[in-house]
Amino acid sequence: MKVDGKDIRTIWLDKDERIIKIIDQRKLPHEFIIADLKTVDDAIEAIKDMYVRGAPLIGATGAYGMYLATLNAPHDQIDIEYLTKEGDRLKSARPTAVNLAWGVDKALTAIVNVSDPARKIRLAKETAAAITEQEVENCRKIGEHGLSLIEQLSSSKGGQPVNILTHCNAGWLACIEHGTATAPIYAAFDHGLDIHVWVDETRPLNQGTRLTAWELGKHGVKHTIITDNAGGYLMQHAMVDIVIVGTDRTAVSGDVANKIGTYLKALAAWDNQVPFYVALPSSTFDWNVRDGVNDIPIEQRDPAEIKYVYGLDQDRTTKVLICPESSPAANYAFDVTPAKYVTGFITERGICQATEEDIRSLFPDKGR
Ligand code: MRU
């Protein structure tokens, strides 16, 4: 995507191939910072502290983390014990998004039976790069498939603006390019359809306010930031034509884990007959989990993320306390929307219903 006229991705290999470059998303939209990852510890910190975030992007970061592991192996001993240990450390950085383990395991599988250390390093680098390119292409195809839904809504409204509600940031910043939930939005905009996006603020880290609004604005897409609690009201008053969200892990049954608050949007959409779609690449399906509500691990983050907010004061970013300092807070970062509330999935292979049968018919080659 373009930022101030320049093409940029969220992760890339530096000219010095021992360094991975990322956008540090923590201070966006007020500061645009590029950070270097040189070691596995750097990659873990970037994932944990959310310099990088969003399921596809942390999958790619996990794979590049394994490349960094091969580069930094003690005494050049890139053996299986060492790689497994580094892979496990990377995987435990964030528990909910299945893409992280998927990216790490793909890199590990590519190199585990190779004995030549130089070849191991090269293969790890190539695998991480291939994952990155594949996710870009998957997101582009999600855009193509999702476009048809917005086109139908646009023609049923006689070309009046289509109002799309989204939660969190499932945009290019959460991926590498295009985004998942935003891919159909960008495709519709680029096709000249009149669209408008309701952007949930997404407390506590405000991925909607800070990141989705910034991205959409840079692309010229009309949007309005709303509080997390406004969606129900808007849906009751026919101000939302479709909800499109991303996901961090979707069970093969169709249960969807996504940023906390997604479930409440799905309930409101269900009650108001608003179509509720989830956009995802196949890397976000968990082929081993059926009961998403009970079996998808839900990350709990530092309560300080609720108690403090960051913002721009004059011309510098500042952190302020917004509650009684002594009040406890509980920071559940994700929730699970049962499949029955999901109208459909927008994937790289097309659109399907939220049932195991339909998911497997699109992906007969996966997860067996
Ligand atoms: O905690 P985050 O910001 O990593 O959560 C991200 C989300 O919940 C996204 O909706 C999800 O990863 C889909 S990414 C395209």
Image (tube, rainbow, N blue to C red):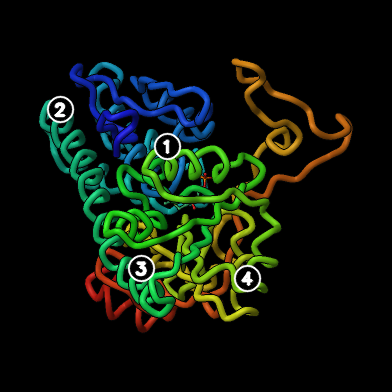
Q: Amino acid at mark 3?
A: Ile
| Cα distance between the residues tagged 1 and 4 | 40 Å
Q: Position of residue 63 (x, y in %)?
A: 30, 39
Residue 90's image quarter?
top left
Q: Amino acid at mark 1?
A: Leu
| Secondary structure state at the residue bearing disc 3 | strand
Of labels 3 and 1, earlier in sequence is 1
Q: Earlier in the sequence, mark 3 or mark 2?
A: 2
Three-letter code, disc 4: Met
Percent from the top left, x then y, of residue 183? Answer: 34, 55
Which x, y percent locates residue 15?
18, 19
Q: Nearer the viewer, residue 29 or 169?
A: 29
Q: Label 3, label 1: how many angstroms apart (C-alpha)? A: 28 Å
Question: Residue 235 got which mark?
Answer: 4
Camera-near label (4 vs 3) is: 4
Query: In this figure, which residue is indicated by the disc labeled 2?
Result: 117
Q: Which residue is mark 3?
A: 346
Q: Are the two marked residues, 3 and 2, in contact with CB atoms closer than 8 angstroms?
A: no
Q: Is residue 23 left or right of residue 256?
A: left
| Cα separation between marks 1 and 2 | 21 Å
Q: Quadrant of the C terminus?
A: bottom left
Q: Calculate the distance from the C-alpha at mark 4 to the C-alpha at mark 3.
A: 21 Å
> Which tag, 2 or 4, sits closer to the chain's start?
2
Nearest-to-viewer mark from 2 and 4 = 4
Q: How many marks?
A: 4
Mark 1 = which residue? 90
Which residue appears at 27% of the width and 43% of the height? 108
Of callouts 1 and 2, the N-terminal one = 1
**Dot 2 lies on which element?**
helix
Q: Quadrant of residue 43?
A: top left
